[in-house]
């Protein structure tokens, strides 16, 4: 009985092993196919992930290239506009010069004042007793020289006052933008609270916006009435920010820092060239001082220069040579930053 049970158990074990082997043999191919399918699916998923990563990287590169091209195109357009305006900035018409000088005078009235200035100067020299040959030159200088020199002087002084206050105004705009105030409101704040002439220039921007111009277009017109590079920089920064985006407060803060550094550099150059300017003033004034001292000590010795035709020729030639020397020294001491 015990032997029979062992035989049955062995048979059952053998039958079970046979069934398991048969099942494994039948299912092996299916299991291998499932494994291969899983590997292929994993490979496909990995390839899809790699393609998505590569595509995202390509999109980022393309977006950066597009933004770079947009900025380059904007800079090129702005450069073309600045070149078109640079001619008017270097040698603007008289009407533009009067606006840049902050003078509320029409061109016709300016010409009238110029003629009056020439007539008055000529009359004064005639009353003083100047030679008749000098009077035509005085008339020409009074009509075309002194009034335009005065306009240039007022223009340069106004630009200097603008550059003194402009970086502070940019700092106010930066703080206003960082606190959440819109740029238009910050510009209106400067137009109402800043000192002259910054106040007038920003008021023109606000008035241009009221007439329908956008803020970048209105800012780009500032160099027409304020002929300096700093005004052009401000317009370029606003234009690029409006087209390409970016952190406006950071851009304006960097611009303010650049303007202050330019101001420091100009002051340093003026300090370094002050010795040469003093030497030029002394050398230029020395002939007049010597002539005056000789006239006080020996008037008969120097009077032939003013009473004889040869003396007149010597004075003219000496004046031309002195003018050339002063012009050369001025060019050597002036630096554009």
Image (spheres, rainbow, N blue to C red):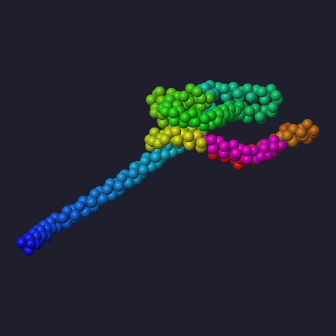
Residue drawn where x is 6% and y is 72% of the image: 1
Magenta stretch, main secondary structure, is helix
Residue drawn where x is 46% and y is 48% of the image: 72
Picture coordinates of residue 77, whole percent (x, y): 47, 44
Residue drawn where x is 71% and y is 29% of the image: 118
Q: Is residue 155 visible?
A: no
Q: Nearer the viewer, residue 45 or 300?
A: 45
Picture coordinates of residue 20, whole percent (x, y): 13, 68
Picture coordinates of residue 23, whole percent (x, y): 13, 67
Q: Quadrant of residue 155?
A: top right
Picture coordinates of residue 330, whole percent (x, y): 71, 45
Query: Is residue 133 shown above or below 9?
Result: above
Instruction: Looking at this view, name the residue that lies furthest to the front.
Output: 1
Left or right, 289 with respect to 120, comes to right
Left or right, 134 with respect to 177, comes to right
Residue drawn where x is 81% and y is 41% of the image: 285
Q: Is residue 250 visible?
A: yes
Q: Nearer the viewer, residue 170 or 9?
A: 9
**Which range is magenta?**
259-287
* 117 in the magenta segment: no
């Amino acid at each position: 009985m015990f032997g029979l049970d062992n035989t049955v158990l062995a048979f059952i074990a053998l039958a079970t092993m046979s069934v398991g082997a048969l099942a494994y043999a039948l299912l092996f191919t299916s299991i291998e196919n499932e494994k291969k399918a899983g590997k292929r699916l994993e490979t496909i998923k990995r390839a899809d992930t790699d393609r998505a990563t590569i595509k995202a990287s390509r999109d980022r590169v393309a977006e950066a290239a597009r933004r770079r091209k947009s900025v380059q195109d904007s800079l090129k357009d702005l450069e073309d506009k600045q070149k078109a305006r640079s001619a008017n900035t270097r040698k603007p018409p008289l009407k533009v010069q009067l606006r840049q000088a902050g003078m509320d005078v029409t061109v016709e009235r300016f010409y009238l004042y110029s003629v009056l200035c020439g007539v008055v100067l000529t009359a004064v020299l005639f009353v003083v007793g100047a030679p008749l040959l000098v009077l035509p030159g005085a008339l020409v200088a009074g009509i075309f020289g002194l009034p335009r020199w005065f306009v240039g002087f007022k223009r340069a002084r106004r630009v200097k006052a603008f550059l003194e206050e402009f970086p502070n105004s940019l700092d106010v705009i930066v703080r206003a933008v960082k606190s959440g105030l819109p740029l238009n409101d910050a510009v209106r704040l400067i137009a109402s609270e800043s000192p002259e002439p910054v106040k007038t220039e920003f008021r023109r921007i606000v008035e241009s916006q009221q007439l329908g111009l956008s803020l970048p277009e209105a800012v780009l017109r500032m160099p027409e009435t304020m002929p300096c590079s700093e005004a052009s920089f401000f317009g370029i920064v606003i234009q690029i920010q409006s087209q390409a985006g970016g952190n406006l407060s950071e851009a304006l803060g960097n611009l303010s820092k650049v303007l202050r550094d330019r101001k420091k550099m100009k002051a340093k150059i003026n300090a370094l060239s002050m010795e040469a300017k003093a030497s030029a003033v002394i050398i230029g004034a020395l002939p007049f001082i010597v002539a005056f001292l000789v006239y006080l000590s020996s008037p008969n010795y120097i009077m032939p220069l003013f009473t004889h035709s040869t003396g007149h020729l010597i004075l003219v030639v000496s004046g031309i040579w002195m003018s050339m020397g002063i012009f050369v020294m001025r060019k050597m001491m002036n630096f554009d930053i």
